[in-house]
Image: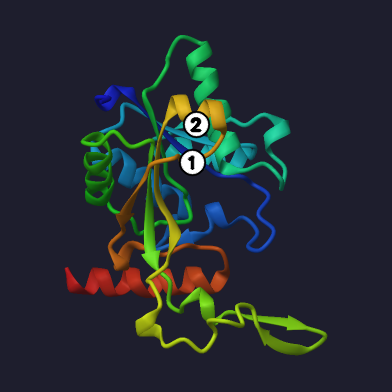
Amino acid sequence: MAGPGEILCIVPARGGSKRFARKNVALLGGRPLIAWTIAAARDSGIFDRVWVSSDDAEILDVAVAAGAVPLVRPAALAGDTATVAQVCAAAAKQFADDGAAYAAAYVLLPTSPLRSAASIRAAWARFADSDADALMSVQPLAHPPEWALAVEAGCVAPADRERYETPRKLLPQRYRADGAHSIVRTEWLIAEQRLIGPRTLAFASPVEEAVDIDTPQDLAWAEFLLARRRESV
């Protein structure tokens, strides 16, 4: 499996967030949100560089100040419809075309600021010791998907009528991707433009690190967790 110099570490950070404007440079604990991810990646010691892909000059400037290397995103991949996988696949292909092929890509979303360098090393160790196509960090769903409701014409109805009233203990545990860690072999990523492969390992992020910033309320929750973490040190 790849050594430290053969892992493409990429932090995708688009500038045009609609739900939370400028979230990638919003301040958390006095530092831009993206700086937390860059710091954890650098502290992990498993990457030769941390690349930040963005279409936004301010984000790239902040990334450089935090110790990352800027990767200007093509305009075709800067819109709302471009997926993280497509962005990362394009970057991996460009490196390969330039003669700097990486064996694996480690994708770190800037919206998971509380992930630690230790967790990055642990996720990589799990992937490197396997023959898996990819690895994805997950958290248990708070409620079974079988209990989901649909709302039509102002009225609610079970989305799964047959299993809606099934007791939790009789339903299988389901999970969600938490966005903190994604690793994928670059050969698969470039060919399929997907971060999940036929055999994708599950990596359980520590609960205290599994914060995903999509709204100002999420940022406030992260501030609370960060303050509690600092008090406990």
Report the amino acid beneath label 2: Leu
Quarter that holds the N terminus: top left
Q: Residue furthest top?
A: 99
Residue 114: image location, x then y, percent: 35, 59
Location of mark 2 (residue):
189
Mark yes or no: residue 71 visible.
no
Question: Which of the 4 quarters of the picture holds residue 75?
Answer: top right
Q: Residues within 10 Å of mark 2 (few under 14, many from 20)?
A: many
Residue 154: image location, x then y, percent: 79, 88
In the structure shown, which secondary structural element does the residue marked by tag 1 occupy?
loop
55 vs 26: above or below: above
The span from disc 1 to disc 2 (Cα, nearest Å) is: 6 Å
At x 48%, y 41%, the residue is 195
Position of 13 compared to 153: left or right?
A: left
The image's mark for residue 195 is 1
Mark yes or no: residue 221 visible.
yes
Position of 12 compared to 199: left or right?
A: right
Q: Residues within 10 Å of mark 1 (few under 14, many from 20)?
A: many
At x 34%, y 72%, the residue is 225
Residue 36: image location, x then y, percent: 38, 51
Contact? badges 1 and 2 (CB < 8 Å): yes
Report the amino acid beneath label 1: Leu
Q: Nearer the viewer, residue 201 or 97?
A: 201
Q: Earlier in the sequence, mark 1 or mark 2?
A: 2
Q: Residue furthest right?
A: 153
Quarter that holds the C terminus: bottom left
Q: Nearer the viewer, residue 142 or 179?
A: 142
